[in-house]
């Protein structure tokens, strides 16, 4: 069904797992890399929801060091083929090569709109679910759930992934189906996301479900369990997991111990988990679990004389006294702790706390060039006595940026539209920052949303009386002046829809009844002023609803031309 792009992938796809695993072990050693001592120490003996929450308490602790502009640099460590500069793109087989990120997007495999899209939460730059994706595939994927595209139902197919009508879609219009060789990768990524962010309130619940357990719809659990079992953990995932750990200091447990999936959602629910073979910390032995030795704290590129910061988590067990932290090396003066110096002390008691403690390191280059230093960690009762973290950064000239020109929104529907702006010729831009203002009942909310191209799909329009957007170019975290402002009104959605599938709305005293030959999705009901009054995930023939007296317009994803009706 899909082409594969390397020998390891071919083995993974076509060989039985036992044989595949033997081959990988011969090539690379043990298929499972060494898990840090004590990292999963709190799992054994727990069952189902308690086990999932124990994992949440472990993996939610990640270093908040990456910014949106740093992601392509980190992807060079996590998503490039071994011994090659070719990007390892799970969405396309178009040959694209690092360090250029041209033609690629920073893709949230679990769509950011599902939690509301806020860029202020860790999930926005969590590399455990961010992958490089060819732009057209990324656009086609949109915010659709994972699924199996029905025969003849695809509307996008690049030979690696498909988008189309699904066997089950959780109420979405379409589903996204990855290649067989990557279905397990996506399944384990989604299991990670609903564990690490089980505290989220999900805006879209095609696959996710609110609450700490099970945190997924049953159809999604069934699908991802099948993909997880059919496509076992590969060396690619193991290598990536290790690199992510060295970047942001947390791991995907379902890659380290795939059987955890069965204990939480699968055929071992209710059984106590005792499968963790992670090295156990001997009693009274001081162990620093994170940061890992040899971790890279990469500040990426920054404008000269500008400051960027990173946070680093310290977490351990049975440590005593205090740690002595020192920044050393030829460029040490450019890297400082929050106290403004290159030396500080850290109490072991803070590191022993269940959630550990954080330190902040700043990088402020005073000259153009590449700079390195080293954070040396000593004492604290560690069994391994000392630990080192590499500090890296590169300073470039301060960019001169002009304001983009925002242009009118297009593709306006009841719930979304496409914002546009003109690029400034000749200027190098890392990304754009869109400032969205949403007006609702006299209250204004403001959100900043990064965008990779000179357009951005904005959803949640049904929650607004009016939107405005403006744009800035961003290079080295330096922003251009703000563009002009574009206003978008919900009533424009009614003027942008055309007829598709047949739909009839019958009005009776006290209720309305839908008549349709097949189910229709994303039903939106407007009042006469264009305000959204009701949204219905799916409507079926003979479904009945009640509304206050008045005149209404009704649309669905399949019937875009508004139907006028009267509630009596």
Image (spheres, grey):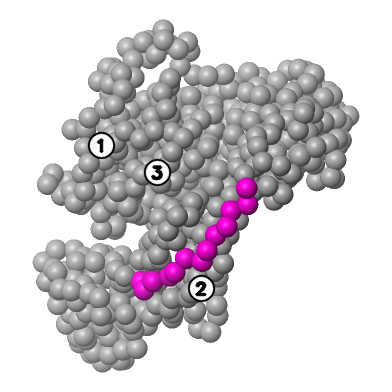
Magenta extent? 397-409
Identify the residue at image location x=53%, y=19%.
33
The image's mark for residue 40 is none
Instruction: Give the overall secondary structure of the magenta segment.
Output: loop
Is 298 above or below relative to 234?
Answer: below
Q: Nearer the viewer, residue 564 or 307?
A: 307
* Image quadrant where residue 377 sits: top right
Identify the residue at image location x=18%, y=48%.
154
Instruction: Give the residue pinned by disc 3.
Output: 102
Residue 405 in the magenta stretch? The answer is: yes
**SS at mark 1 in the image:** loop
Q: Residues within 10 Å of mark 1 (few under 14, many from 20)?
A: many
Q: Residue 199: where, in percent of width, then height?
A: 55, 52
Q: Residue 461: where, in percent of width, then height?
A: 40, 71
**SS at mark 3 in the image:** loop
Residue 413 is left or right of residue 508, and the answer is: right
Identify the residue at image location x=31%, y=33%.
95
Instruction: Give the residue pinned by disc 1.
Output: 160
Q: Earlier in the sequence, mark 3 or mark 2?
A: 3
Q: Nearer the viewer, mark 3 or mark 2?
A: 3
Q: Nearer the viewer, residue 352 or 431?
A: 431
* Image quadrant where residue 189 sits: top left
Q: Earlier in the sequence, mark 1 or mark 3?
A: 3
Identify the residue at image location x=21%, y=48%.
156
Work out how far the residue at label 1 is from the one at label 3, CA to CA, in angstroms. Answer: 20 Å
The image's mark for residue 437 is 2
Residue farthest toward the right in the current orientation of the protein: 321
């Amino acid at each position: 069904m899909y082409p594969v792009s390397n020998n390891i992938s071919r083995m993974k796809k076509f060989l039985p797992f036992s044989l595949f695993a033997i081959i990988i072990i011969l090539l690379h050693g043990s298929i499972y890399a060494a898990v840090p001592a004590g990292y999963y120490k709190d799992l054994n003996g727990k069952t189902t929801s308690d086990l999932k929450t124990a994992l949440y308490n472990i993996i939610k602790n990640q270093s908040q060091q990456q910014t949106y502009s740093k992601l392509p640099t980190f992807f060079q460590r996590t998503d490039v083929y071994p011994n090659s500069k070719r990007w390892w793109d799970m969405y396309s087989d178009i040959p694209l090569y690092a360090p250029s990120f041209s033609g690629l997007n920073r893709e949230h495999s679990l769509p950011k709109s599902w939690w509301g899209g806020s860029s202020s939460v860790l999930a926005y730059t969590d590399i455990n679910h961010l992958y490089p994706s060819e732009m057209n595939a990324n656009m086609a994927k949109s915010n659709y759930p994972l699924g199996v595209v029905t025969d003849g139902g695809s509307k996008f197919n690049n030979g690696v992934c498909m988008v189309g009508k699904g066997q089950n879609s959780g109420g979405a219009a379409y589903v996204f189906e990855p290649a067989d060789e990557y279905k397990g990768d996506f399944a384990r990524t989604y299991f990670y996301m609903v564990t690490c962010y089980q505290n989220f309130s999900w805006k879209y619940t095609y696959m996710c479900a609110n609450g700490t357990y099970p945190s997924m719809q049953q159809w999604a659990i069934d699908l991802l369990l099948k993909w997880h079992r059919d496509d076992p953990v590969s060396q690619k995932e193991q290598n990536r997991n290790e690199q992510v750990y060295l970047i942001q200091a947390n791991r995907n447990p379902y890659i380290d111990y795939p059987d955890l999936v069965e204990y939480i959602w699968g055929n071992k629910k209710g059984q106590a988990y005792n499968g963790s073979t992670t090295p156990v910390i001997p009693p009274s032995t001081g162990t620093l679990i994170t940061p890992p030795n040899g971790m890279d704290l990469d500040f990426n590129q920054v404008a000269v004389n500008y400051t960027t910061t990173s946070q680093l988590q310290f977490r351990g067990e049975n440590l005593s006294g205090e740690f002595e932290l020192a920044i050393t090396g030829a460029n040490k003066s450019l890297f400082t702790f929050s106290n403004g110096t290159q030396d500080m002390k850290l109490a072991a008691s803070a590191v022993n706390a269940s959630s550990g403690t954080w330190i902040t390191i700043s990088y402020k280059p005073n000259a153009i060039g590449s700079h390195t230093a080293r954070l040396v960690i000593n004492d604290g009762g560690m069994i391994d006595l000392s630990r080192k973290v590499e500090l890296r950064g590169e300073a470039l000239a301060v960019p001169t940026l002009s304001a983009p020109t925002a242009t009118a929104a297009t593709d306006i529907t009841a719930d979304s539209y496409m914002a546009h702006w003109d690029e400034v010729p000749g200027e190098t831009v890392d990304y754009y920052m869109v400032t969205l203002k949403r007006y609702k009942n006299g209250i204004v909310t403001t959100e900043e949303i990064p965008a990779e191209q000179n357009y951005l799909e904005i959803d949640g329009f049904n929650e607004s009386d009016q939107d405005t957007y403006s744009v800035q170019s961003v290079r080295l975290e330096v922003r251009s002046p703000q563009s002009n402002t574009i206003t978008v009104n919900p009533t424009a959605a009614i003027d942008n829809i055309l007829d598709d599938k047949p739909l009839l709305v019958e009005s009776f005293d006290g209720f309305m009844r839908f008549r349709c030959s097949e189910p229709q999705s994303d039903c939106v009901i407007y009042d006469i002023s264009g305000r959204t009054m009701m949204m219905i995930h799916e409507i079926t023939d003979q479904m009945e609803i009640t509304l206050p007296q008045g005149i209404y317009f009704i649309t669905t994803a399949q019937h875009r031309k508004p139907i006028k009706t009267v509630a009596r």
